[in-house]
Amino acid sequence: MGLRSSQELHSRGIVQLGQDTFDDARVRGLFSSERYAEARDLSLELLARKERLGRAHPSWQQSAETLLEIYYVTGEYEKAARLLTEALRFADETSQVYFTRLSKLAGLYEKMGAYEAAEPLYLQVLSLRKSALGEEHPDVMSSLSYLAALYRKLGAFEKAEKHLEAAKVILDRCRSAASAHGRKPDYENWLVSMGMLQHAMRKYEVAEPLLKEALLHQEPRQHLGERPKRFYATTVSLYASTCSALGRHQQAEQYFQLALDLRRAMLGEHPHVAASLHDLGLHRMSSGDLDGAQQAFSESAQIRKQTLGPCHPLYAESLAALAECFCFQAYRSSDFAGYEKALELLVQVGHIRLKTISKILSTLSDSRRFAYLRTIESSLHLIMSLALGPLLELASARKAALEAVLRWKGITFDAQIAEGEDTELAMMRNKLARLILDAAKPEQVEECELEIERLEASVSRSMDLQRRLESATVETLLKVMPKSCQLLEFLVFSKTDFSQTNAPKEECYAALRPYTSTEVDLWDCGKAEVMNQKISKFRILVQRRFLPNTTGRRADFDRIGCELFDLLLRPVQGRSLKHLFIAADGELSCVPFAALPLKEGGFLADLPWTTSFLLSGRDLLGTDMSATSQEPVVVADPHFAWKGAEEGDPALLYSDWDRNLHFCALEGTRHEGIFAHDLLGGTLLLGEAATVKRFKNIESPRVLHVATHGFFLQDQPGSTRLEAVLSQTENPYLRSGLALAGAQAWQEGFPLADSGVITAQEIRGMRLQGTKLAVLSACDTGRGEIRRGQGVLGLARAFLIAGARAVVMSLWQVNDESTGIFMRSFHGHIKEGLAPIDALRAAQHDLRMPGDTTGLRGLKAPAAWAAFTLQGWPF
């Protein structure tokens, strides 16, 4: 190349460099002037020109950062994520630039609704910043705030509040008293974040002063151009929502309109504008302006669909709000078509959430799954309100309601099953149980809990949850269920009164029963408060040992029992049934259905039905959990006072604990265990052999029979050692368990290494795949914490999660001689080849009193037992 050519190239390079510098400045100017479309187009052109320098070149990186900011403001999140992923490739992984970009990528995933991808990135950035910058750096505070915002969206309010409180500690230490409220935006950001969280928690009186203070600082600064108006608009919108919740409607309308005008002027068709419209619609609906609310929701849905896509959670949110608005309008105008339009939208909402909920649930910890589901359950409750109300005569509405319930109920259980056999997670859960039982330091427990959450959010999922949910239709259900069987699906839901937009919602029970591919029975079982009182009273009455059956039967037993039968089962009675599957909800999970009396005499157990329980009708579709079964195992009559292989030093005894919760020997359990072992064969663990260590080593027995004390502790502090340590945790799997060898010695203060107690938390990590039947012949093994729509969290569920296909459990204390008689009869029928459910029913009939021709007289023992199946059919 000649000298002249070289000079020409050099000159062109200088000219190009000058042009690039000029265009960089133009892009920044256009962006500052809020001319975002022009800034984006010029930025794209500039970035393409700089490709000649290479993407690792600082000039390309700088232009990429500018375009990223433009994409973020214009709501083009997918484009921003792709560009940011590319830019990350060329950043030093130990640099602040890398940390910032990784945090921005997490924020983009959050905006896109991919919460399952955002959280691990936020956590990674937090860890990197703490290691590189120290625990009290302002960037660490920012990471805590971002995580808090994500947890707020997922409904994990306590976790969000904890992160914001930690951020405030750092903020207070970093800023001087002189700059407390003046120089930096960090304090304002914290005020807004905490105000937003308090609003989400419905603590409006707490949120209002926080947001008001933030506005006082932001308003003068945004007029001076010191901060972008979009931050101010966010605070204005949130303050408006808080005013609306406090009943200050006129003030709320003014602030809503201000936020909308600010955002529309800056952003045009943008997700933030859609958010303002959505909030404005909620305000107008609550104040009775239904036409204005419909217009706002419709526009919000249109913008979200256009900018975020038709499968985004926020688009579903707008459609759900629009559906609710249609319901109130339909009632006001007596327009039946409005209810039908609402149903169509809600079905669409369900389809959208099917595409995202499985991803989200599969990457959340147990506690946060429940929290997230609470944030979106209102759509299901609205469908039920429609189907039980104005659309009751519409077959498609009843079918849509059942399919929504089938896909909703017990979904957390499916997510737990999908965790598979992750050994590290099982080990950490065991470690947590041991730490709590050993009264370890709070920081050790917290560290272990955080590690469990991390593992629960990261373990690979073996089950295609979305496919399983999509397959839960009335048609697929009826294909696998023989005609001689019926499903009765119950749901507790919050019923909407369409006559008033602000009417309080009452919790009610509903029952659904499919009988053809297009026909579903649906009936109202009554208000939950009234029903729960009946259930509680009936359980007390059943537990009275002797109840005359033909003459002199207690009037209150007959009255309450027959009322429950009519409300729950009367539409099913008289049909040709061989097996009734009950997917209970709420307190119905504790109803002794076998003891429900018939008006014509006798009990439900006398009818020609076999009854068993499911978490959800979806369980009838089965799960792929095939495994090889080993020989049966029987665990019975543990030596509770056992102090280990060698006697310990009495001087090591801990505090002098109260003896109220006393694990005394259970009369008859040794004979029960020996009988079961003689009948079934396999391994027998009696007395001192029934230790926690040997119990944990049980693997895939065909039948597992456990005869010992079970427990479920409420969440209030107790006076015994076990109560004192376990009541400190909110985890229901840690508050329930079984007493094994040494339990009473440990309870009285003896320093046993394994405490003689195994919690449900540890049981759920056992290897019970291939176990056809687990029999929990102990007191209260069916008890636990009831979660609406998600079942009873306790011992029985832990055995199902561990892999048992069916669990026979007790609904109350059963430590009398009839228990042994009952269990011998039950296992005798198992030996004869009966399925567990049929064997249970046969055993209940075997306990009839002599001369009892019309039904069960001694109800306490036979009615106490219920069977819970993971896969209903085939047995």
Image (tube, grey):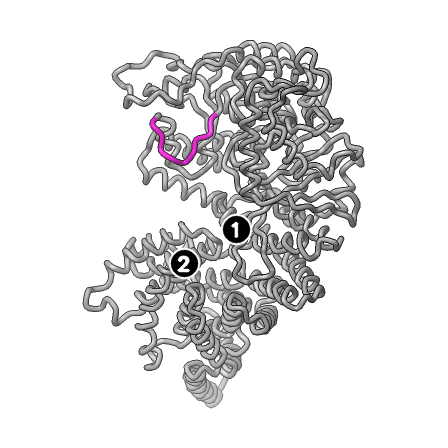
Q: Nearer the viewer, residue 700 or 708?
A: 708
Relative vertical location of residue 684 with respect to residue 796 in this rendering, above or below: above
In the rendered view, would you say 453 is above or below 222?
above
Label 2 sits on residue: 197
Residue 299 is drawn in which quadrant?
bottom right
Quick check: can you spot residue 350? yes
Residue drawn 73% across and 39% down?
Answer: 571
Q: In this view, does 682 lie above or below 190?
A: above
- Find the magenta span and give its range: 711-719
Query: Helix or strand or loop: what does disc 2 sit on?
Result: helix
Query: Residue 693 at x, y = what percent?
Result: 46, 22
Q: Which mark is residue 374?
A: 1
* Three-letter amino acid code at the position of disc 2: Leu
Magenta stretch: includes residue 717: yes
Mark 1 and mark 2 residues within 8 Å of each other at the beta carbon: no
Q: Quadrant of residue 151?
A: bottom left
Q: Is residue 12 above or below residue 704?
A: below
**Left or right position of 267 against 597:** left
**Does residue 770 show up?**
no
Q: Earlier in the sequence, mark 1 or mark 2?
A: 2
